[in-house]
Amino acid sequence: METDENRIAEVLRRLSGRARELADRVNCPDEEELAVFLGGGSSSDIVKIIEAHLAECSFCLDDIVVAFKADESRESATVPQYLMRKVQALVDRREPLFEVVAKLVQNTIELMKTSGRVVSMPPPVVRGAAKPVLPNALQVEQEVGRFRIAVEIEVSEPEACQIVANVTENTGLPAEGVRLSLNSDEREHASFLTRGGIVVFDRIAPGEYSVAVSESGAQIGKIKLSLMLER
């Protein structure tokens, strides 16, 4: 156990110590505290404090994950699985940035539920239509730190959607170099960096997805997407 803790502390000191020089981080536990916590040596009160901090601080949590991955690449030692399970449980506990649940009905889309802010979109215009035409696209956005992240879902073809993510700085300028990765069932479908603040995922079938958002390797959070098909 002591050997594991020393090894983890060494890796964390190298990686997260450097990250703290680059970011404005306060009240973060130091590397030794994290190593003792992950090794099961902290008191119950300290465990609660650190777990609460990790649930809110993506910097510290990402440092731990990166440190584990770096350590696992070494042939001389492997991080114990119980430590990886503890870290994964903390990762899974974090709430999504926002959630969108939508239903595809023929060539239209219906918003069922969202925790984000719905952006009004002009209805499609069809000549000679006797009744209002249902929309084939919807857009939801949320303020996340210094970013505004908007996700537009459009029915692009029968039983398939196009998902467009638009990331802007709080200044209104497009955010460059933000990575968005579309995942489902622990499998990555596609991963792109924003160009002009935009990332596009084409021909997405109905299903359960998450969009991981990160910048310079540090995870910002995930967006949950649930696309249902009404037959």
Image (cartoon, rainbow, N blue to C red):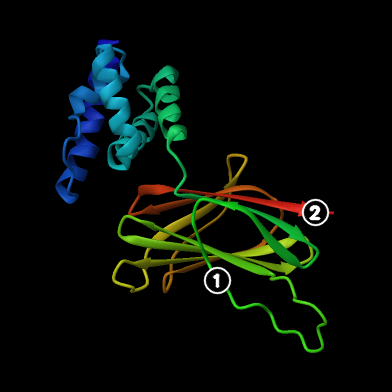
Is residue 70 visible in the rendered structure shown here?
A: no
Q: Distance from label 2 to label 1 (Cα)?
A: 23 Å
Marks 2,1: beta carbons within 8 A = no
Quadrant housing residue 122: bottom right
Q: Which mark is residue 230?
A: 2
Tell me which amino acid carries mark 1: Ser
Quadrant housing residue 39: top left
Q: Is residue 39 left or right of residue 134?
A: left
Q: Which mark is residue 211?
A: none
Residue at 28 percent across and 32 percent down: it is 53
Q: Nearer the viewer, mark 2 or mark 1?
A: 1
Residue 96 location, x and y as percent? 47, 44
Residue 69 location, x and y as percent? 38, 34
Residue at 73 percent across and 71 percent down: it is 134
**Secondary structure type for disc 2:** strand
Quadrant housing residue 139: bottom right
Residue 65 location, x and y as percent? 36, 35
Is residue 16 visible in the rendered structure shown here?
A: yes
Mark found first going from the N terminus, 2 or 1: 1
Can you say which quadrant of the picture contains the C terminus? bottom right
Can you say which quadrant of the picture contains the N terminus? top left
Residue at 39 percent across and 29 percent down: it is 72
Mark 1 is surrounded, within 10 Å at the Cα level, by few (under 14), some (14 to 19) or many (20 or more) other residues, namely few
Q: Which residue is mark 1?
A: 120
Q: Is residue 96 left or right of residue 65?
A: right
**Secondary structure type for disc 1:** loop
Note whether 51 is above or below 223 in the view shown: above
Note whether 176 is above or below 70 in the view shown: below
Tell me which amino acid carries mark 2: Glu
Q: Is residue 180 left or right of residue 36?
A: right
